[in-house]
Amino acid sequence: MGEAGVRSARRPEVRLPPLEPWPDGELQPDGDYDGLEFREADLAGQDGAGARFMDCALTGCAVDETALGRARVLDSVLTGLRGVGTNLAESTFRDVEVLDPRLGGTQLHGAVLERVVIRGGKIDYLNLREARLKDVVFESCVLVEPDFSGARLERVEFVDCALKEADFGGATLKDVDLRGAAPLEIVRGLDRLSGAVISTGQLLDLAPVLAAELGIRVEG
């Protein structure tokens, strides 16, 4: 239990076994990848929809327009991924560390994230609509215009994390700790923040937007 009664996220404990190098080639739809190291692999434009990655390390890989919808990423470490338009819709991430990503327009709508840490890096226009996040930590990263609309967040923490122009419209929050977000900018869904905890300073910063959303005129 964290401060102010908010329950802390359970972080993943990933212990990778000795890994075999991935023989360069093409990802396969519904492929099964177990105990492999993908290092500096160019996966741009490849189709790995429905694939399963178990006990894998992906390091410095290019994932521009990579199709990974409904993929399952389990007990794995993803470091330095870079790319625009990666499709991970309806995918599952469980016990995963994502370190120093440089991503834009990543599609994670309808995805399930459980015991996931995203640390460092920057993600622009992250689409998490209708996703389910449980025990997820965003740490020391920059999120620009993330879309959490319709998502369910439980035990989610933002630690030393920039959250710019976030959309929480229609979202459901439980034990979500936003106190470590600086700046904390919310463009939609302030009325959905029941179940979140923010600091006094953040409340003052959000006051003009909150007043506007409630139809309150502030003068002089």
Image (cartoon, rainbow, N blue to C red):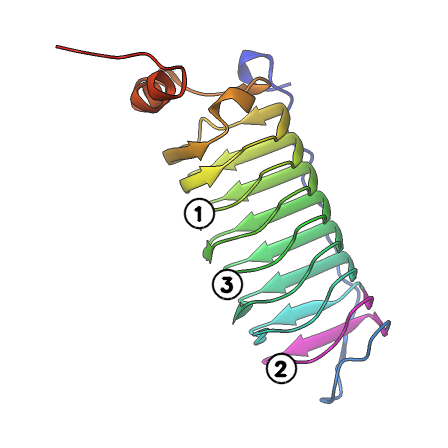
Q: Which residue is mark 1?
A: 145
Looking at marks 3 and 1 on the same chain, the residue that comes earlier in the sequence is marked by 3
Circles 1 and 2: CB atoms closer than 8 Å: no
Residue at 39% from the left image edge and 33% from the top image edge: 184
**Tag in front: 3 or 2:** 3
| Apparent side of residue 165 relative to residue 64 in the rendered image (left or right) | left
Q: Of the residues under marks 3 and 2, which one precedes in the sequence?
A: 2
Highlighted range, magenta: 31-52
The relative height of residue 169 versus residue 49 in the rendered view (above or below) is above
- Residue receiving disc 3: 103
Mark 2 nearby-residue class (10 Å; few <14, some 14–19, many ≥20): some
What is the three-letter code of the residue carrying label 2? Answer: Ala
At which x and y percent is residue 186?
A: 42, 33
Most extreme residue toward the left is 220
Prevailing SS of the magenta stretch: loop
Q: Quadrant of residue 208?
A: top left
* Residue 47 in the figure: left or right of residue 215: right
Q: Nearer the viewer's eye, disc 1 or disc 2? A: 1
